[in-house]
C-alpha cells in the first residue's frame, strides 16, 4: 500500500519549509517520485505505464493521487515505490502517522519526534530562503536531503523499531536515482541566492 504524507495545507507548508504560495505539497508524494525517469527504471515501468503516468493530473487529494497511481502500477511496483519513498524521506518518514503506527511508536516517542521536528524547522526555513526561486522538484530534493541528514532522529527509536524501518525501506536505491543519496540532492541557489547548506 502506498501512503501519502497527508497534513493540512497550512501545517504542511510550515512543516515542509514551503511557502503558502506553492500550489502543491509534493515532497514525499509517491506520484511525484514515480514521474522521475530513474525511479521508473528502478520500478521497471513499461512504455505504456510511463505514458499513462504522464497523463495523470497532478492535482487532487492524497487519496485521489494514491488511487490514480495504484491503478497504473503492479503490486510489486507499489511495494518498491513505497520503499523508495521511505528512503527519500529518510528520518522524516517518522513524521508520517502511518509509518509511526507501523513502527509502533509510543506516545512519548511521538512527542519527542514532533519536538525535534519543530526545533529544526527554523534552520530549514532559513536554508529554504536561499533557494526560493528553485523548482518544486529542487525544493523537494532539498527538503528530503535536509531531513536525511538529521539522523539523530533515529536515536529516538529502539532497536526493533529501527529494524522495522530498515525492513520497510527495502534494498538501498541505486545511486543513479537523484535525491536518494544524502548530500547529493541540494540544488545550487538560483539568481545569486546564498544560504547555509545550499550547495556550492
Image: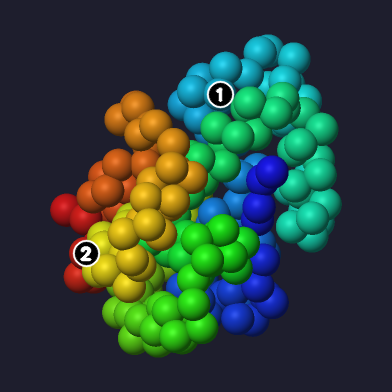
Mark 2 lies on a secondary structure that is loop
Instruction: Tell me how far mark 1 sits from mark 2, CA to CA.
Output: 31 Å
- Residue 21 location in percent, x, y? 61, 73
Query: On the image, which quarter does residue 10 sit in?
Result: bottom right
- Residue 187 location in percent, x, y? 32, 52
Q: Say which of 32 and 62 sits in front.
A: 62
The residue sitting at 66% across, 52% down in the picture is: 3
- Say which residue label 2 marks: 197
Image quarter where the N terminus lies is top right
Q: Tell me if I can see residue 62 in this picture.
A: yes
- Residue 179 location in percent, x, y? 38, 43
Query: On the image, which quarter does residue 26 sit in?
Result: bottom right
Q: Is residue 152 left or right of residue 10?
A: left
Which residue extends farthest left?
200
- Residue 22 location in percent, x, y? 61, 67
Which residue extends farthest front?
160
- Say which residue label 1 marks: 43
Query: On the image, which quarter does residue 23 sit in?
Result: bottom right
In the depicted structure, whether residue 159 falls above or below residue 194: above
The residue sitting at 50% across, 61% down in the picture is: 103
Q: Say which of 61 and 80 sits in front.
A: 80
Q: Tell me if I can see residue 56 in this picture.
A: no
The residue sitting at 30% across, 42% down in the picture is: 181
Which residue extends farthest top?
47
Does label 1 or label 2 sit earlier along the sequence? Answer: 1
Name the image colouring. rainbow
The residue sitting at 42% across, 79% down in the picture is: 109
Q: Is residue 100 left or right of residue 116?
A: right
In the depicted structure, whether residue 172 falls above or below residue 185: above
- Packing grade of label 2 (10 A; few <14, some 14-19, many >=20) is some
Q: Is residue 180 left or right of residue 197?
A: right
Amino acid at each position: 500500500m502506498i501512503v501519502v504524507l497527508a497534513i493540512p495545507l497550512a501545517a504542511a507548508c510550515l512543516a515542509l519549509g514551503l511557502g503558502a504560495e506553492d500550489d502543491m505539497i509534493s515532497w514525499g508524494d509517491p506520484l511525484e517520485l514515480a514521474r522521475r525517469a530513474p525511479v521508473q527504471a528502478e520500478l521497471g515501468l513499461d512504455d505504456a505505464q510511463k505514458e499513462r503516468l504522464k497523463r495523470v493530473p497532478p492535482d487532487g487529494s492524497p487519496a485521489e493521487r494514491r488511487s490514480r497511481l495504484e491503478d497504473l502500477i503492479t503490486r510489486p511496483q507499489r511495494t518498491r515505490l513505497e520503499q523508495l519513498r521511505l528512503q527519500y524521506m529518510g528520518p522524516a518518514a517518522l513524521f508520517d502517522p502511518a509509518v509511526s503506527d507501523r513502527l509502533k511508536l509510543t506516545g512519548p516517542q511521538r512527542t519527542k519526534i514532533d519536538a525535534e521536528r519543530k526545533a529544526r524547522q527554523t534552520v530549514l526555513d532559513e536554508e529554504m530562503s536561499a533557494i526560493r526561486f528553485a523548482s518544486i522538484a529542487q525544493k523537494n530534493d532539498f527538503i528530503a536531503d535536509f531531513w536525511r541528514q538529521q539522523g539523530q532522529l533515529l536515536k529516538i527509536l529502539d532497536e526493533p523499531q529501527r529494524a522495522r524501518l530498515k525492513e520497510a525501506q527495502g534494498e538501498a536505491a541505486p545511486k543513479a536515482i537523484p535525491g536518494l543519496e544524502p548530500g547529493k540532492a541540494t540544488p545550487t541557489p538560483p539568481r545569486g541566492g546564498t544560504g547555509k547548506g545550499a550547495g556550492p
